Amino acid sequence: MEEAEIKDIYDELGQRVRNARTRAGVTQGQLAQRIGLTRSSVANLEAGRQKIMLHVLLGIAEALDVGPEDLLPNRRQDKTIDLARLNAEARNLQADDRDFVLSAVRTGVGRRSQ
């Protein structure tokens, strides 16, 4: 994983913690006291400058009454399939290849919607 990508992860984590803390009506000092950190550590975490261990993340989630997954950055790539574009491109393939691609896509789309 690239350094810039790691920075983005901690920046987004910090934003999510700040948003959850603000929604909960909790100050940085109050959150720090609840989880056993200093207020400056919470400020650094929210600014993306401080890395945290898993047990701290779980403590933050509990203190803010949110799920830990709500604080984690969304790292999934958009896997949306533009079926109209795929169908148009498949027209340029030979019949066997086109049938194979379209069959594979249908199978994958079926699995994703279950």
Image: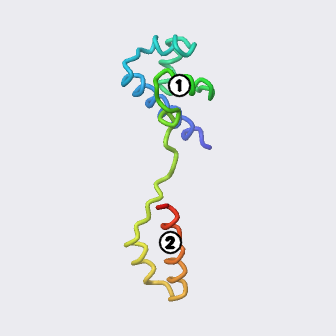
Mark 2 → mark 1, Cα distance in angstroms: 42 Å
Residue with the mark numbered 2: 105
Q: Residue at x 59, y 26 (%)?
A: 51
Relative to 58, is 96 above or below?
A: below
**Vertical arrangement, residue 57 with respect to residue 83, above or below:** above
Q: Work out whether 4 lies above or below 101.
A: above
- Residue 112: percent from the left, percent from the top? 50, 61
Do residues under tags 2 and 1 come within 8 Å of each other at their CB atoms? no
Quick check: 93 above or below 32?
Answer: below
Indicate the amino acid at tag 2. Answer: Val
Q: Residue at x 42, y 27 (%)?
A: 20
Assign the N terminus to one quadrant of the image. top right
- Which amino acid lies under the numbered mark 1 shown in the image of this protein? Arg
Query: Which residue is rendered at x = 49% and y = 67% of the image?
Result: 110
Residue at image position (51%, 37%) is 69
- Locate residue 80 relative to residue 111 in the image: left or right: left
- Out of 75 and 63, give the one closest to the viewer: 63
Along the line of sight, the residue nearer the viewer: 16 or 48 = 16
